[in-house]
């Protein structure tokens, strides 16, 4: 048996054709395409198609996918009733996890594990995750839900359903690119979770529900929310040095920095940095961008750490008018494309994922009956 490696660091657990990360060369590749190839050129829907099918769609294939998404953009009544029972202050990630699990209860295809059925379910998940997030977000504010429009893509529709107004072109393009940048990331904790569940031949809803649970943690997807809270706490670019010195003295982990794989920087952060700047300039308020830049410079100087995907997505989402506790649900909305692609790949050539543990407990203890234990 090979030896124990804490956190499975650098352990290769399976073969995949979906995503490649080069942590030394700062590269992220989806199905052979460098991530930079898509930004400003492709829509999120095209990238989703690529992740699921292994090749970019033709115009006709993309139109079919868009129609399928539009057709799936209605929440089952049981789900609406369920969401309405949740307390208004319910944590959005917990709402999403529970609602996605409930989708599996009402889907007639739930236990059909054919590839075609799983593709149909993947479309439903992709169409409905953003609806669930927006539906609950508006409900808790006492506002009526807003229906998606069949002429808009997933990015514009989400901002419309959430805010009640149609985003402009810059907002749409930036949010669409954010969805692309978060779509997949090899064998991260939530994707590994999804594949582990799928490897038992359980259903895709169970796999995605479990993945949402894994993404919720602050060491994974939850960091982007903490980043924005940090920026709000600092409040002013002038205060960054003082705040950081204090935080590092208190041995605090600075959210949005560091990565298990990227050791020379996260390529996604390069795009998100631009988006944060562009939106700041458009709004005439570059405070959050400036503060982030200063923090980035200082973290490199003091700790040699680079920002990860969660760092600049925080100020980008903030300037898109998205409530902070929706940042991680949005991550799930994008990443469901990658999770489902990995689940499809897992089913296609399945082997039960079942690692071993190095036993470190006691041995050969003598059993004493309950009455004899003091
Ligand atoms: N702030 C301060 N110090 C840090 C940070 C940070 N954000 N990240 C790593 N370090 C330090 C650690 O204290 C440790 O120092 P030490 O060796 O002196 O103890 C060293 O860098 C190595 O850290 P590890 O935790 O061993 O690195 P690991 O690969 O396990 O962790 C992780 C990666 C979890 C992302 C870590 O960098 C972290 O906690 N970052 C903050 C949370 C975060 O931003 N998560 C989002 C990740 S991206 C994503 O999931 C979408």
Image: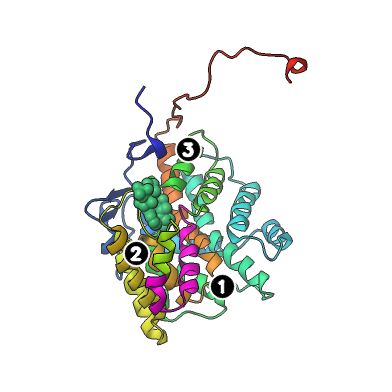
How many angstroms separate mark 3 from mark 2 (CA)? Answer: 34 Å
Give the crowd class for mark 3: few <14, some 14-19, many >=20 residues within 10 Å.
Answer: many
Image position of 94 (left or right of 241): right
- Residue at 67%, 57% (x, y): give it: 79
Confirm whether residue 62 shows in the render. no
Please tell me in which quadrant of the rendered image residue 61 appears.
Answer: bottom left
Which residue matches tag 2? Answer: 59
Of residues 226 and 160, the one drawn nearer to the viewer in this rendering: 226
Q: Which residues are magenta?
A: 219-242
Please tell me in which quadrant of the rendered image residue 169 appears.
Answer: bottom left
Secondary structure of the residue carrying tag 3 is helix
Which residue matches tag 1? Answer: 162
The relative height of residue 4 versus residue 139 in the rendered view (above or below) is: above
How many angstroms separate mark 1 from mark 3 (CA)? Answer: 33 Å
The relative height of residue 171 versus residue 313 in the rendered view (above or below) is: below
Q: Earlier in the sequence, mark 1 or mark 3?
A: 1
Are the residues flagged by discs 1 and 2 in contact, CB closer than 8 Å? no
The percent position of residue 271, horizontal first and vertical second, equals: 31, 68
Give the crowd class for mark 2: few <14, some 14-19, many >=20 residues within 10 Å.
Answer: few
Q: Is residue 186 magenta?
A: no
Q: How many marks?
A: 3
Q: Is residue 240 magenta?
A: yes
Q: Give the residue furthest to the bottom.
A: 284
Which residue matches tag 3? Answer: 196
């Amino acid at each position: 048996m090979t030896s124990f490696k804490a956190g499975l660091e650098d352990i290769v657990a399976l073969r995949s054709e979906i995503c490649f990360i080069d942590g030394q060369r700062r590269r992220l590749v989806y199905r052979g395409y460098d991530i930079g190839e898509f930004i400003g050129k492709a829509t999120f829907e095209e990238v989703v198609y690529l992740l699921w099918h292994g090749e970019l769609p033709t115009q006709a294939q993309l139109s079919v996918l868009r129609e399928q998404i539009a057709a799936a953009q209605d929440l089952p009544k049981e789900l609406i009733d369920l969401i309405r029972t949740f307390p208004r202050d319910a944590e959005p990630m917990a709402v999403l996890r529970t609602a996605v699990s409930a989708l599996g209860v009402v889907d007639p295809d739930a236990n059909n594990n054919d590839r075609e059925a799983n593709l149909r379910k993947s479309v439903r998940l992709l169409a409905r995750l953003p609806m669930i997030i927006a539906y609950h977000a508006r409900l808790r504010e006492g506002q009526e839900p807003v229906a998606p429009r069949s002429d808009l893509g997933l990015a514009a529709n989400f901002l419309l359903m959430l805010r009640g107004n149609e985003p402009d072109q810059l907002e749409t393009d930036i949010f669409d690119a954010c969805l692309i940048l978060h779509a997949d990331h090899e064998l991260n904790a939530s994707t590994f979770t999804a594949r582990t569940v799928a490897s038992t031949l359980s259903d895709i809803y169970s796999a995605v529900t479990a993945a949402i649970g894994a993404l919720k943690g602050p060491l994974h997807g939850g960091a982007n929310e903490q980043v924005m809270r940090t920026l709000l706490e600092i409040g002013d670019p002038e205060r960054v040095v003082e705040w950081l010195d204090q935080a590092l003295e208190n041995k605090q982990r600075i959210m949005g920095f560091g990565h298990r794989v990227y050791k020379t920087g996260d390529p996604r952060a390069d795009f998100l940095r631009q988006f944060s700047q562009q939106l700041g300039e458009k709004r005439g308020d570059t405070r959050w961008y400036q503060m982030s830049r200063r923090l980035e410079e200082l973290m490199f100087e003091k700790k040699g750490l680079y920002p990860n995907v969660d760092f600049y997505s925080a100020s980008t989402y903030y300037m898109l008018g998205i409530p902070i506790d929706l940042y991680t649900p949005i991550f799930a909305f994008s990443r469901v494309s990658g999770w489902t692609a990995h689940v499809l790949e897992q089913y296609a050539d399945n082997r039960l994922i079942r690692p071993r543990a190095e036993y470190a407990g006691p041995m050969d203890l003598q059993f004493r009956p309950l009455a004899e234990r003091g």
